[in-house]
Image (cartoon, helix red, strand yellow):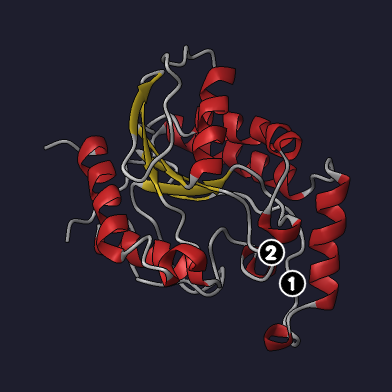
Amino acid sequence: MARYAKPADGDGLTQSNALLADLEREIVGCRSCERLVRWREQVAVERRAAYADQQYWGRPVPGFGDPGARVLILGLAPAAHGANRTGRMFTGDRSGDWLFGSLWRTGFANQPDSQSRKDGLELSGAWVTAAVRCAPPANRPTTAERDSCLAFAERELALLCEVRVVVCLGGFAWDAALALLRSRGATLPRPRPRFAHGARAEIGGLTLLGTYHPSQQNTFTKRLTEPMLDGVMRQARDLAFPT
């Protein structure tokens, strides 16, 4: 499987890395949404029995990956006992097992799974983030919480200047991506692009691709299979890295 070399760390990328680090610190310190702050911190104190001996992250979760990424993967929000525990998007839960397995099979990751921030996972050509940075109750952030958090994603995308493709994991992320592009000044097509697995839209110089979210609800019921997810990731790869 193909592996993509990271671009040389020139002055532009060095500056971008520094600004991404600044943005990460700002995200981690955010307390804007009272409901989300209360929930993420409650979960971090009460903990799940299987992780009772672990120190939960319990804060907003920043994006991570290759600063020279051409593919941005946009999720919904951190899982209460996944990224809210480990401090890295999609790390330590079943959805992440599916996502990183697919990224490994399609050449974007150096290993097929991720359990902690120090497990050696590296992404090449891809950046993983979410529309909402705090774990929400019942995994359901409100539209207002999404819109409050989108300013972070807008700044993140501006700093990831090589991004060509945005892969939206689920309908919530698809709607968030459309709102994000509109806030960047892009004109949305009419009729408004609708989410579906395999959906594609060209907006504001970027290609949006839709896939069902790799949640247990979708993977256990076979609504989403590994070949389906891999197919979208391969499409993203081919669009972002044309031969």
For the residue pair 211 and 102, the one nearer the viewer reads as: 211
Residue 222 lies, in percent from the top left, at 36, 67
Q: CA distance from mark 1 to mark 2?
A: 7 Å
Amino acid found under the numbered disc labelled 2: Asn
The quadrant holding residue 227 is bottom left
Total marks shown come to 2
Query: What element does badge 2 sit on?
Result: helix
| Residue where numbered disc 2 is placed | 84
Residue 106 location, x and y as percent?
25, 58
Asked if residue 146 is positioned above or below residue 128 in the image, the reply reads: above
Q: Is residue 98 left or right of residue 174?
A: left
Whether 17 is drawn above or below 224: the answer is above
Residue on which disc 1 sits? 56
Q: Residue at x 69, y 32 (%)?
A: 147
Near mark 2 (Cα within 10 A), the count class, few <14, some 14-19 or many ≥20, is: many
- Left or right, 39 with respect to 212, comes to right
- Front-most of residues 3 and 142: 142
Name the residue rendered at 50%, 72% in the picture. 94
Q: Are marks 1 and 2 in contact (CB under 8 Å)?
A: yes
- 207 left or right, relative to 171: left
Is residue 4 visible in the rendered structure shown here?
A: no
Earlier in the chain: of badge 1 and badge 2, it is: 1
